[in-house]
Amino acid sequence: MKIKNIYWIIAGVINLLTAFLHLIGGQMSLVDPLSKSNLELQVKTELLGVWHMVTVMLFMSSIVLLMFGLKPKEEISKAFISFIAYSYVLFSICFIAAGIFNAQFAPQWTLLLPIGILTIIGKRKMI
């Protein structure tokens, strides 16, 4: 019988929605205007590459959370889950700090922090 970790499944769904929001909404509101800006071509190229690295991370970690949320406990890598959980908490802190530094609300943390917290809670529930 498969043991489900509802916290990881919820985190995975939120993460998947975040990935699509990043891919579509972020492309239109951030990437497209940056590509039309006067920034040097090298800077635009590197920003585009980094943007899509984040997209890959969002989709891949969504798959892992959903997959591990549906697997039996003995098949789950606690270290890998911890890596994802604490990465998302740290990503959130980066957006919070950037928002404070620039006196500008950066809403990304409102999606990233719950993913990290739910993943941590789910890890503690499996012990």
Image: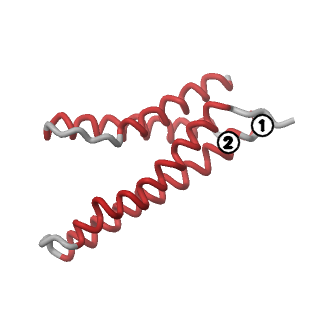
For residue 107, side relative to residue 80 (left or right): left
Near mark 2 (Cα within 10 A), the count class, few <14, some 14-19 or many ≥20, is many
Q: Position of residue 38 (x, y in %)?
A: 12, 72
Q: Secondary structure at mark 1?
A: loop
Identify the residue at horizontal 27%, vertical 72% (top origin). 45
For residue 110, side relative to residue 8 (left or right): left
> What is the count of numbered marks?
2
Residue placed under numbered mark 2 in the picture: 68
Nearest the camera: 106 or 66? 106
Q: Secondary structure at mark 2?
A: helix
Residue placed under numbered mark 1 in the picture: 72
- In this picture the colour scheme is secondary structure
For residue 103, side relative to residue 21 (left or right): left
Question: Which quadrant holds residue 100?
Answer: top left
Looking at the rendered structure, the kind of residue marked 1 is: Pro
Near mark 1 (Cα within 10 A), the count class, few <14, some 14-19 or many ≥20, is some
